Amino acid sequence: MSVPEQTPYKEYMGNGVTKNFALEFTCDSKQELKVFIDNVEPELSTWSLVGGSVVFTTAPASDSKIVLKRATKLERTTNYSSTNNSFRPEAINKDLDRVWLKLQELGVADMLLKIYVDRLHGEQKDYIDNKD
């Protein structure tokens, strides 16, 4: 499987009722997903990854900010060898897919940093412009 073009980051606002939040990006396991509610990472036992959605046991409160982002581990799981038939297309594709997933995450990290810096710059400019 090739990795589709996607943004491995999604934000939602809680409404006190909704428990299911779609990822809208590929994520193979709960261990490679970071979930935040109002910038706090909830206990792993309070949510699950089910069919491409994060499902909370209790709906996040109204106006709470829910952030879902993929966090692919930087590890290679296959040790290739010419003697044990491990150098096969399926194994190579899986490792290359992990590289592409991580590259997508790094692109999002740059985007989020730019948004943060621009916002901070705007706040400082407003402060200076409105200073008596």
Image: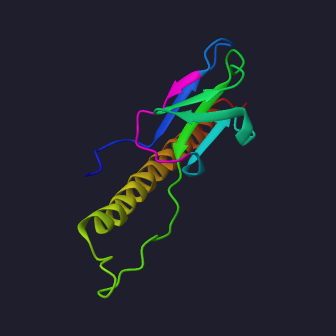
In the image, 81: left or right of 65? Answer: left
From the viewer's side, name the closer residue of 72 and 79: 79
User: In the rendered image, which quarter contains the C terminus?
Assistant: top right
Model colouring: rainbow
Magenta segment includes 25 = yes
In the image, 94: left or right of 12? Answer: left
Place residue 7 in its image quadrant: top left
Count of numbered circles on the image: 0
In the image, 105: left or right of 42? Answer: left
From the viewer's side, name the closer residue of 120 and 32: 32
Residue found at x 66% / y 33%: 47
> Does the magenta stretch mainly form a helix, a strand or a loop?
loop
Place residue 26 in its image quadrant: top left
Q: Position of residue 68 (x, y in %)?
A: 55, 37
Residue found at x 44% / y 47%: 111
Q: Position of residue 35 (x, y in %)?
A: 62, 39
Q: Position of residue 66 (x, y in %)?
A: 62, 29
Place residue 67 in its image quadrant: top right
As drawn, the residue found furthest toward the front would be: 84
As drawn, the residue found furthest toward the bottom would be: 83
From the viewer's side, name the closer residue of 59 and 131: 59
Relative to 28, does residue 21 appear above or below in the rendering? above
- Please give the range of residues in magenta: 20-29
Residue found at x 25% / y 52%: 2
Residue 41 showing in the rendered view: no
